[in-house]
Image (tube, helix red, strand yellow):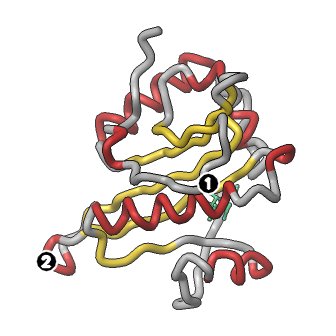
């Protein structure tokens, strides 16, 4: 196996409460074969992404050094069962500071109700602090606000969007 890691696994903090047989790790370059996109598909449209497209995007994210896609793997089945992404955005403001964004948080249907979403959220908040972001934000549906507030988020400015 010669898969590559998207980022240095040392960035992932120690996790106390992870169920046996599961591991929290960076996205690997072979996770196309491990069900990663099938998990993401449970959040929104993924489209017909082939392995080469996946690898190209992986390499582009890796070289930017701004993408921390964290997954939970079922070690026995070698399947990705949950994922969440921390994106680090560089700024001129706040003393050339960085802003963190939490994106694409999803847990496979069969693994819900086991606090895996909480594990991923806690991991990303910790990582964002260690990466010295001055703020961390996410977008979510109204009904998920009580869930995300558990990890320190508060309602702030309204978010606007246009779609293409
Ligand atoms: C949610 C996600 C966001 C994701 C979007 C996809 C979290 C905290 N928020 O807002 O990251 O990109 O859904 O939906 O995971 P879309 O396909 O409608 O953009």
Residue positioned 53% across, 90% down in the render: 156
Q: Does ligand 1 reach within 8 Å of label 2's beta carbon?
A: no
Q: CA distance from mark 1 to mark 2?
A: 28 Å
Q: Nearer the viewer, residue 153 or 21?
A: 21
Q: Tag 1's secondary structure?
A: strand
Residue 18 pos. (x, y %): 61, 50
Ligand 1 - quadrant of the structure image? bottom right
Task: Find the residue positioned furthest to the top.
Answer: 1
Q: Which residue is mark 1?
A: 104
Q: Going 75% across and 52% down the picture, which residue do you hit?
A: 43
Q: Quadrant of residue 54?
A: top right
Residue 95 - label: 2
* Relative image position of residue 85 (x, y in whole percent): 51, 52
Q: Is residue 79 left or right of residue 155?
A: right
View extreme (right): residue: 110
- Write down the quadrant of residue 162 in the picture: bottom right
Asked if 118 appears above or below 93 in the picture, the reply is: above
Q: Nearer the viewer, residue 52 or 145?
A: 145
Q: Who comes first in sequence, dot 1 or dot 2? A: 2
* Residue 12 position (above or below residue 7): below
SS class, disc 2:
helix
């Amino acid at each position: 196996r010669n898969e590559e890691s998207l980022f240095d696994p040392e960035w992932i903090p120690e996790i106390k409460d992870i169920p046996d047989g599961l591991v929290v790790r960076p996205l690997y370059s072979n996770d196309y074969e491990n069900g990663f996109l099938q998990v993401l598909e449970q959040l929104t449209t993924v489209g017909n992404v082939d392995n080469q497209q996946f690898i190209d995007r992986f390499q582009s994210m890796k070289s930017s050094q701004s993408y921390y896609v964290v997954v939970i793997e079922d070690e026995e089945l070698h399947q990705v069962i949950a994922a969440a992404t921390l994106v680090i955005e560089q700024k001129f403001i706040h003393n050339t500071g960085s802003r963190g964004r939490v994106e694409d948080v999803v847990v496979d249907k069969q693994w819900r109700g086991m606090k895996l979403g909480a594990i991923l959220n806690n991991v990303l908040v910790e990582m964002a602090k260690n990466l010295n972001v001055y703020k961390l934000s996410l977008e979510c549906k109204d009904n998920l606000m009580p869930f995300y507030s558990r990890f320190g988020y508060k309602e702030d400015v309204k978010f606007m969007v246009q779609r293409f």
